[in-house]
Amino acid sequence: MNLSDSVLQRADLFDAQLEGANLRGADLSQCKLSRAKLAGADLSGAKLGGSDLEQADLRCALLTGATLEGANMKTTRMFGAQLEEASLVGTDLSSANASGANLRGRKLKGAKLVAAVLSGADLSAAQMQSADLSHAKLGCRYSSSYSQGEKLSTASACLSGADLSGANLSCALLRRVDCSKARLVGANIYQTDFSGANLYAADLTGVSVQHGCFGSFNCANFTNAIVTLNSSTVETKGAVGLPTPVDGVFSRASRVEKPDPENPPDSDSEL
């Protein structure tokens, strides 16, 4: 079906059958697309701002350069979707399955990702300031409540270089997630699980951990990270690269160049 460059503003496309459709450059802003079947559709450059995509099927859809600002994408299935250069500022992705999605460098400022499944997703260099990722699943182990046959990645997400300043990460699962060089300034990490996460050169200045409610950093890599953490509110068994605590506080205010033990440099072979 070829609907490229079509003007479909405010159209009612509830439960529409659009699998594999060509919707390149189409204007679908403020459309009702809830439960629409868009698996494998080409939506590159499409305008979807303010649209209702709740429970839509966007698996493996091409959304390169699409505008999704302020869209309702609750419980949307986006496994393997391509979102290069797409804008998702203020988008509601609560409980969406974006497992394995390409969100590298995407604008997700203020987006709602509450309880979203992001395992295996590439969020490196994403702009996620003040985003709500509470209860989100970015790690490699979680229980699924999705229907039978739903695809779920078993790999961890990549947040390398992402900006999560002021983000709500409470109760999120980030086990073994690559957070190297990520900016987590002022983030809420209440009961967040960073077990085995790579926090090499990350900035955790001013992160918030509610007293008596532990955040887990067991076996995490803190090498060269900027960090201020109260040892009484975090679990750090097996963690590496933490500074020696002073008065019960792990504190490092600046980085010292050290190699990342998770990604050691290649050594020259001897002739």
Image (spheres, helix red, strand yellow):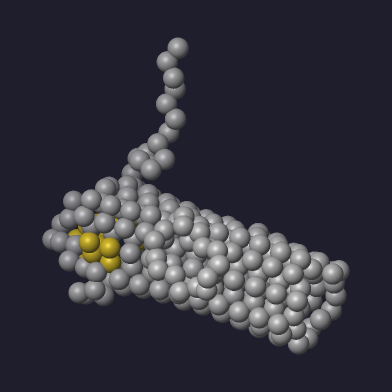
Q: Where does residue 61 sit, x and y in percent of width and height?
A: 69, 64
Q: Quadrant of residue 271?
A: top left
Placement of 131 over or under 155, stated as above or below: below
- Tell how many labels: 0
Residue 254 in view (yes/no): no
Q: Residue at x 41, y 40 (%)?
A: 263
The answer to whether 55 appears left or right of 262 in the picture is: right
Residue beneath the point at 15% across and 61% down: 248
Q: Position of residue 185 (x, y in %)?
A: 39, 65
Who's the residue at 52% across and 73% down the image? 147
Query: How far across and how far down the image is residue 172, in percent?
Result: 38, 69
Q: Which is nearer the eye, 109 or 137?
A: 137
Residue 17 image point, x, y percent: 75, 76
Residue 128 visible in the current orientation: yes
Q: Quadrant of residue 266?
A: top left
* Name of the residue lying farthest toward the top: 271
- Closer-to-camera residue (15/249): 15
Q: Please determine whether, in this image, residue 56 is positioned above or below residue 259.
A: below
- In screen coordinates, is 85 left or right of 22? left
In the depicted view, which residue is nearer to us: 60 or 122?
Answer: 60
Q: In the figure, residue 229 lies in which quadrant?
A: bottom left
Q: Is residue 247 above or below residue 46?
A: above
Quadrant placement of the N terminus: bottom right
Residue at 17%, 55% (x, y): give it.
Answer: 245
Q: Residue furthest front?
A: 148
